Image (cartoon, rainbow, N blue to C red):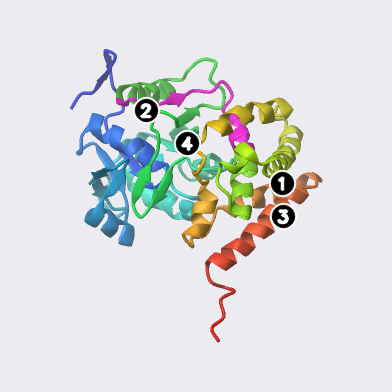
């Protein structure tokens, strides 16, 4: 099949997605609709594969059964791999995509955090890896996702994007053809740190206190904690030469009011579903960087240990019978 977008011959004709969770479902239906079942595949093994084959996944009330490949599938390189896994499954996912990576394959790793691209490039090389991150709020429970597909967006590109490289243009053309919302940021490192700062303030505060995003609509106390956590990230970013400050914190105020009141960030969803969280790459990373750079991070220290206790509680560590 030859794919065309706005009269352009598409260079990306085959896509593999690993991680059909709260971020993966943002892409999957639109990619399959455009590329077809034979050219859009989900990579999954073990029990996860069995669940997807048996039940599929529901996205905004529509159930989908995507083509499933296993990591052991004979080498069948994709033109584009989208990694939408959680940090707890990242190392395994890096190994699992090995048969999907060919000479010209590009990889977008849309997981949270600030170092997944470096970790991925250490295995496959920078010629295969573009920077990427997402801004989206998706509620996912029992294999069903509900979200506004016009609210979320993927950000991607080279480190700098004043002029677009060919591989960035290729991904752009695919997303245009599929109707996937995106932005190509002039400075991807700054953009990733901005998202990291927001995640620290919002994700960590909600998780530790057990509150939805809506708390930031009405609670000055919740916002005081959120902003304090963000300011610690700003200090670290500035020390590393990344231009963030109070203006960026203020700019986020309007965005957070647009998130539906009852929506919950990923870390709180993990705790409520008794799953291990990504705390190590969130507050844990801030604390470690602060120690390395001589910057005090008391709010993130509390986030880290407080959410670790919440993890222990959700896993039943404090349950006593009799």
Q: Are marks 3 and 2 in contact (CB under 8 Å)?
A: no
Circle 4 — which element?
loop
Q: Which residue is identified by label 4? A: 136
Residue 133 rendering spot, x and y as whole percentages: 50, 35
Q: Residue 159 falls in which quadrant of the image?
A: top right
User: How many neighbours does mark 1 have within 10 angstroms: few (below 14), some (14-19), or many (20 or more)?
Assistant: some
Q: Give above or below for 67 relative to 175.
A: below
Which is more N-terminal, label 3 or label 4? 4
- Residue at which label 2 appears: 180
Mark 2 or mark 1: whose residue is earlier in sequence: 2
* Residue 188 in magenta stretch: yes
Asked if 149 appears above or below 303 in the picture, the reply is above
Instruction: For marks 4 and 3, give the CA distance.
Output: 26 Å
Circle 1 or circle 3, nearest the eye: 3
Q: Name the one closer to the observer, 2 or 122.
A: 2
SS at mark 1? helix
Q: Distance between the residues labelled 4 and 1?
A: 26 Å
Q: Is residue 278 left or right of residue 248?
A: left
Say whether disc 4 or disc 1 marks the residue closer to the N-terminus: 4
| Stretch of the chain drawn in magenta | 178-197
**Residue placed at 28% from the left, 58% from the top?**
51
Q: Name the residue carrying label 1.
A: 289
């Amino acid at each position: 099949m030859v794919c065309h977008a706005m009269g352009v011959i598409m260079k990306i004709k085959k896509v593999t997605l690993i991680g059909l969770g709260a971020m993966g479902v943002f892409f999957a239906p639109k990619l399959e609709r455009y590329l077809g079942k034979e050219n859009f595949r989900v990579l999954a093994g073990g029990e996860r594969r069995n669940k997807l084959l048996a039940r599929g996944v529901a996205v905004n009330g529509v159930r989908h059964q995507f083509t499933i490949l296993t990591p052991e599938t004979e080498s069948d390189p994709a033109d584009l791999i989208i990694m939408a896994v959680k940090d707890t499954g990242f190392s395994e996912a890096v190994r699992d995509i090995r048969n999907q990576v060919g000479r010209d394959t590009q990889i977008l790793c849309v997981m949270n955090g600030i170092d997944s691209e470096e970790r991925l490039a250490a295995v496959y090389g920078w010629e295969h890896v573009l920077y990427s991150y997402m801004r989206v709020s998706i509620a996912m429970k029992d294999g069903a996702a509900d979200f506004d597909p016009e609210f979320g967006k993927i950000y991607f590109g080279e480190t700098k994007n004043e002029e677009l490289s060919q591989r960035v243009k290729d991904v752009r053309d695919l997303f245009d053809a599929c109707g996937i919302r995106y932005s190509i940021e002039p400075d991807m490192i700054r953009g990733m740190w901005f998202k990291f700062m927001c995640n620290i303030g919002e994700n960590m505060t909600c998780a530790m206190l057990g509150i939805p995003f809506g708390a930031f609509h009405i609670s000055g106390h919740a916002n005081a904690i959120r902003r304090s956590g963000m300011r610690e990230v700003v200090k670290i970013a500035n020390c590393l030469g990344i231009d963030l400050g109070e203006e960026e914190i203020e700019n986020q105020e309007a965005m957070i009011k647009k998130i539906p009141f009852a929506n919950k960030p990923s870390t709180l969803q993990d705790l409520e579903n008794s799953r291990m969280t990504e705390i190590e790459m969130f507050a844990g990373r801030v604390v470690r960087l602060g120690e390395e750079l001589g910057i005090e991070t008391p709010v993130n220290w509390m986030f880290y240990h407080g959410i670790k206790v919440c993890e222990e509680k959700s896993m039943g560590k404090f349950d006593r019978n009799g």
